[in-house]
Structures are given as structure tokens and as C-alpha cells.
Image: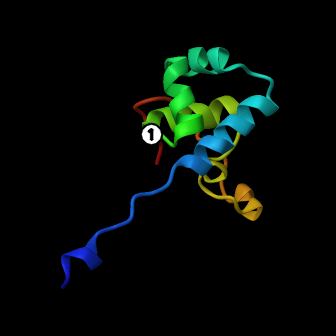
Amino acid sequence: MDSKSSKRKPHDFRPMGKAIKDARIEQGLTRDQTAEEVGISPDYLVLIENKGQTPHFDVVVDLTNLFHISIDEFFSNDPSMSQASKPINAPPNRCDP
């Protein structure tokens, strides 16, 4: 197998950053307010929203909970996907069966 053909293309997180920014603006929150609610720096939020920075998974979960939307809305531009799942509301470090 050719090593070039086995390499995976990295995921482009820019559409997710745009979805995060759109959700923040739609809810009337500033970057500073959002960053404070999620426990990250406003500069890190700028990188996620505008530069396609790969966010930590816990940050994605916190943002979906803050905006009351599902994770798939961040990952898909397909509006039909938005009904596929609900926001994650499990307490940190706990998994219910």
C-alpha cells in the first residue's frame, strides 16, 4: 500500500468555527461573555471562530450546552442533521448508561 494513499486529510474546522460564531451572535453574546461562560480565553475563541483552530472536545460540549444546540449542527452544513441529536447535558466526568 502506498504511504501517500493511506494518509488521511485533516478535518477542516473552519465551518464549525463559523457555526459557533453564528450561534453566539444569534444569542446576542459577545466573545468575552462566551469565553467566560465556557472557561476559555477570548483569544482562543477567536482562533476557533475565525482561524479553524481545532477546539478541545470539552470546549465543544460546553459550547453546545451554552447555545442549546446539538454537536452535529457544528459539524454539518446540512440543516436536516440538526434534528438528529440533542445537546449533551451529562454532568462532567459522568456517563449514564
Foreground: 90 or 83? 83
Whole-percent x, y for residue 79 in the image: 76, 60
Query: Splitting the image into 4 quarters, where does residue 78 fall?
Result: bottom right
Asked if residue 30 lies left or right of residue 54, the reply is right
Residue 95 visible in the picture: yes
Look at label 1 and name its amino acid. Phe
- Residue drawn at (65%, 54%) of the image: 85
Residue 49 x %, y %: 59, 36
Residue 76 position within the rendered picture, expressed as x and y whole percent measured from the top left: 64, 58
Quarter that holds the N terminus: bottom left
Tell me if mark 1 has few (under 14), some (14-19) or many (20+) residues whose alpha carbon lies within 10 angstroms of its own.
few
Image-quadrant location for residue 32:
top right
Q: Residue at x 39, y 58 (%)?
A: 10
**Residue at the far bottom in the pictured view:** 1
Q: Residue at x 72, y 30 (%)?
A: 24
Residue placed most toward the observer, 55 or 89: 55
Establish if 43 lies above or below 61. Answer: above
- At mark 1, the secondary structure is helix
The residue identified by callout 1 is 57
* Residue that appears at 66% across and 15% down: 33
Q: Is residue 68 among what the camera can see?
A: no
